[in-house]
Amino acid sequence: MNLQDKYAPNSICFGCGPANEKGLQIKSLPIDDSNTEAVFTPATHHEAFPGMINGGIIGSLLDCHSNWTAAWHLMNKSGLDHPPCTVTAYFNVKLLRPTPSGVELKLTATVSEAKEDRAKITSELIAGDKVCATCEGLFVAVKPGHPAYHRWH
């Protein structure tokens, strides 16, 4: 089962919330404790110009998928039964080439560095055999009192 449906079925996040009917609803699947994959097929309403998707949509896909990779890794590293709620500290997206709509896109994400409550993630968005965008980001587990602390529960 994908991480979002298993651990945050009521999430309203635009990028990955299963409960957001108008969102992207990406589904991240664990490969191992430090790697995940997802697929997404953009529609015409995700386009910036005919046939190519908007850079903001690309950023949302990479941000959310990377965030879940961090949460998954921190959960396993700490021996928890539920991922900690993580938020984006920063993410840097490089748009390498136009990304087509109407085709299945593959998202990959890997933990490149981790500490007790944070993980640095590198990710890619791939169309066919071409890397269209890359991302590096830092994702941090929040503590009680943070506005996002209970968002997955």
Image: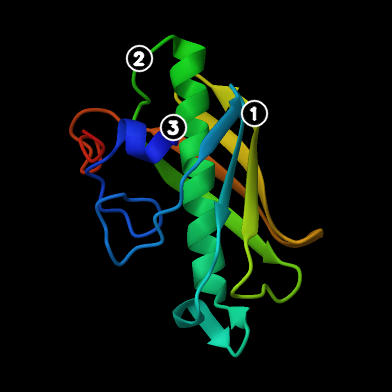
Secondary structure of the residue carrying tag 2 is: loop
Nearest-to-viewer mark from 1 and 2: 2
Q: Badge 2 local density, few (<14 within 10 Å), some, or many (20+)?
A: few
Q: Position of residue 71 (x, y in %)?
A: 45, 31
Q: Is residue 105 left or right of residue 24?
A: right
Depicted 101 relative to depicted 133: above or below: below
Question: Can you tell which mark lies on residue 1?
Answer: 3
Please identify the residue farthest to the bottom as the structure is shown.
50
Residue at label 2? 81
Residue at 54% from the left image edge and 21% from the top image edge: 115
Q: CA distance from mark 1 to mark 2?
A: 22 Å
User: Which callout, 1 or 2, points at the residue further toward the start of the chain?
Assistant: 2
Depicted 69 relative to depicted 13: above or below: above
Residue at 30% from the left image edge and 67% from the top image edge: 22
Q: Position of residue 78 (x, y in %)?
A: 45, 12
Q: Amino acid at mark 1?
A: Glu
Please identify the residue farthest to the top as the structure is shown.
79
Nearest-to-viewer mark from 1 and 3: 3
Image marks 1 and 2: residues in contact by CB distance under 8 Å: no
Q: Badge 3 local density, few (<14 within 10 Å), some, or many (20+)?
A: few
User: Which callout, 2 or 3, points at the residue further toward the start of the chain?
Assistant: 3
Q: Is residue 132 left or right of residue 12?
A: right
Nearest-to-viewer mark from 2 and 3: 3
Question: Can you tell which mark lies on residue 102?
Answer: none
Task: Quadrant for residue 140, please give it.
Answer: top left
Residue at label 1? 113
Q: Amino acid at mark 2?
A: Asp
Residue at 46% from the left image edge and 38% from the top image edge: 68
Residue at 58% from the left image edge and 25% from the top image edge: 114
Q: Position of residue 69 (x, y in %)?
A: 53, 35
Q: Amino acid at mark 3?
A: Met
